[in-house]
Amino acid sequence: MSDYCKGCAYDVKAKTGETACPFNLLYWHFLDRHRDRFARNPRMANAYRVWERMEKTHRDRVLGDAEAFLRRLDEGDPV
Ligand code: SF4
């Protein structure tokens, strides 16, 4: 494993919240947004199973944090 995340302003282990790694947030946001396109793809089945096993409140928080991150990007925030 690498330590590329060392020194980053985000916490790669934080799943939600201000310091959550945006790559995690945006990964799940992308999968959720494109469910109709990818859910039946056998290569994606495990990712969707993992997503569905998460508590709905957690999934909602991940999606909300991802939306907030994307809004900040749209507004020109250097995040
Ligand atoms: S944004 Fe996420 S993946 Fe990239 S260095 Fe920071 S914690 Fe690691």
Image (cartoon, helix red, strand yellow):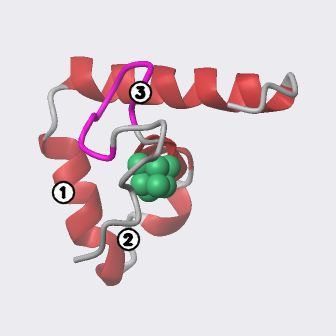
State the SS at label 3: loop
Instruction: Using a 10 Å C-alpha cutoff, classify the residue at mark 1 as few (fewer than 14 neighbours), some (14 to 19) or many (20 or more).
Output: few
Q: Name the residue under label 3.
A: 19
Residues at marks 1 and 2, CA–CA distance in whole angstroms:
12 Å
Around disc 3, counting alpha carbons within 10 Å, would you say few (fewer than 14), some (14 to 19), or many (20 or more)?
some
User: Residue under circle 2?
Assistant: 40
The picture places residue 57, in percent across and down from the top left corner, at 24, 17
Count of marks placed on residues:
3
- Number of the label disc, if any, that sits on residue 49: 1
* Residue 35 visible in this rendered orientation of the protein: no
Q: Are marks 1 and 3 in contact (CB under 8 Å)?
A: no
Q: Which of marks 2 and 3 is nearer the N terminus?
A: 3
Q: Tell me: 79 left or right of 10.
A: right
> Badge 2: how crowded within 10 Å, few (<14), some, or many (20+)?
few
- The residue nearer to you, when weighing 8 against 18, is 8
What is the magenta range?
A: 12-20
**Where is residue 48 drawn, in percent x and y?**
28, 57
Three-letter amino acid code at disc 1?
Arg
Q: Earlier in the sequence, mark 1 or mark 3?
A: 3
